[in-house]
Amino acid sequence: MRLFIDFIPVLIWAMLAAVLVIVMLFASWVLRPHVLQNSEKTSTYECGEEPIGPARVSFPYNYLTYTILFLVVDVLGAFLWLLSSSSLRFTEITVWQFILFTGIFMVGIWYVIKRLPETYLSGSETVELYQKARASSKSSSAHEEA
Amino acid sequence: MQGFETLFEQVEFILLAGLVLILAYLALEHEDIVYAAFFFGMMASVVAGFYLLLEAPFIAGMQIAVYTGGISALIIFGVLLLPRAQDSTLEVFPTSRAKRIGVLITSVVMILSGILALLFPWPESFVSENINLSQNLEELAKWLWGSHGIYVQMTALIILTALVGAVVIMKMEKAERLEPIKGEFGIEAETHPAYTETQEEEQ
C-alpha cells in the first residue's frame, strides 16, 4: 500500500507521456495538409526510384539474436540494480561475486558476437553449392548418355 | 486513516484488474498481430502494479524490465522479421461449437482456481521472516547476494547455456539449408537461357 503511494509520481509521469503522444499526434493532424489518398501517396517511398516489390521483405531471422542479447543484458541489469540498492556492495565477497556474475554474462555475450557471423548463409557458400549441384547434374546426365 | 487506505487499496486493485483483463483480451483478440504484441507489453506493465500493491518492489522492477522491455521486444522483433507473421491474422474458431467448448473449459478452470484461492490458508503459508525480505530491497539484496550467492551464479550459468544453445541451433539450421535442393525446384528445373545454352553447346 505504502509502496503504491510512493510510486504515484511514476504514474503521473506515465500519464504525462501518454498525453504527450496524443498531443503530438493531434498537432500533426492539425498542421498537415488534408489531401485525398492517391496511388502516389500510398506507394512505398524509395528515394528517387520506382519501388520494386513489397516493402515487407524477409530479413534473416538471425537478427533476433540481438534481441536475445538485449534480454540478457536486461536480466543482468535487474540483478545489479538489486545489488546497487543495498550497502552490501562494499564488502569484499560481494565484489568477487559481482565479478564472477558479470564475467559469466560477458563470456556468453562474447561467444554470441564471435559466432554470429558464422550462422549467416554467405553468398560465396551459396555459389559453391550451386556450382557443386550443377557439376553433379552434368556428370550424371553424361553418365546416362554413355 | 486506516479505513481510507484499505478502501483505496481495494479501488486500486479493481482498477488494475479491470485494466489487465481488458488489455489481455485485446492482446488475444486484436486482428493485427503487431497491435496484439503492443497490448501484451502494456498488460505486462500494468501487472507490475499488482506487485507494487503487494509491496514487492524487486519483482515489480523485474516485471517492467524483463516483460515490458525484453519479452515484448522479442515478440515485436519476431513479428517484424517474419514477413508472413506480419500479414497474418490471429486464428478464428472454425465453429461455434469449438468456441462453446473453449468457454466451458475456461470457466471450469476459473471457478476451480477461484475456489482454491478462497480455501487456501494464505496467512499460515507465509514464513514471517520472508515477508520482511520481500518488502525491503536492502534485505532482499543481503539475502540474494550475501547468503544465497549461488542462486545468482546459477542464473548466470543458465543464461550462458541459453546463449550457447541459441547459436548452436542457428548453426544447425544453417547446415540444413546448405543441402543442395534437387528435383522439381532444384538445379534440374533451371530454365534460364544462359544455362540451357551452355548445356546445348556441350552436347
Image: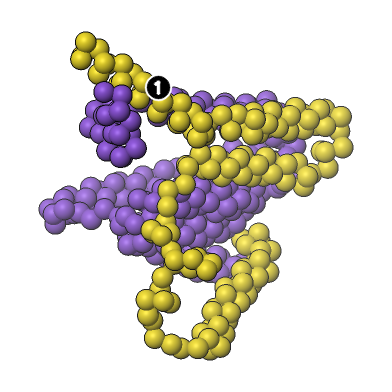
Chain colours: A yellow, B purple
| Left or right of residue B112: residue A50 | right
The residue nearer to you, when weighing B132 against B143, is B143
- Tally of numbered discs: 1
The residue nearer to you, when weighing A29 against A90, is A29
Residue A65: quarter of image: top right
Q: Residues within 10 Å of mark 1 (few under 14, many from 20)?
A: few
Q: Which residue is mark 1?
A: A132
User: Given the image, what chain letter belongs to the residue carrying mark 1?
Assistant: A
Residue B18: quarter of image: bottom left
* Residue at (86, 33) in percent of width and height: A91
The image shows residue B49 at horizontal and vertical percentages of 55, 59
The image shows residue A52 at horizontal and vertical percentages of 41, 60
- Whether residue B181 is visible: yes
* Residue at (35, 25) in percent of width and height: A134
The image shows residue B159 at horizontal and vertical percentages of 59, 31
* Residue at (47, 47) in percent of width and height: A59
* Residue at (45, 31) in percent of width and height: A126
| Left or right of residue A14: residue A103 | right
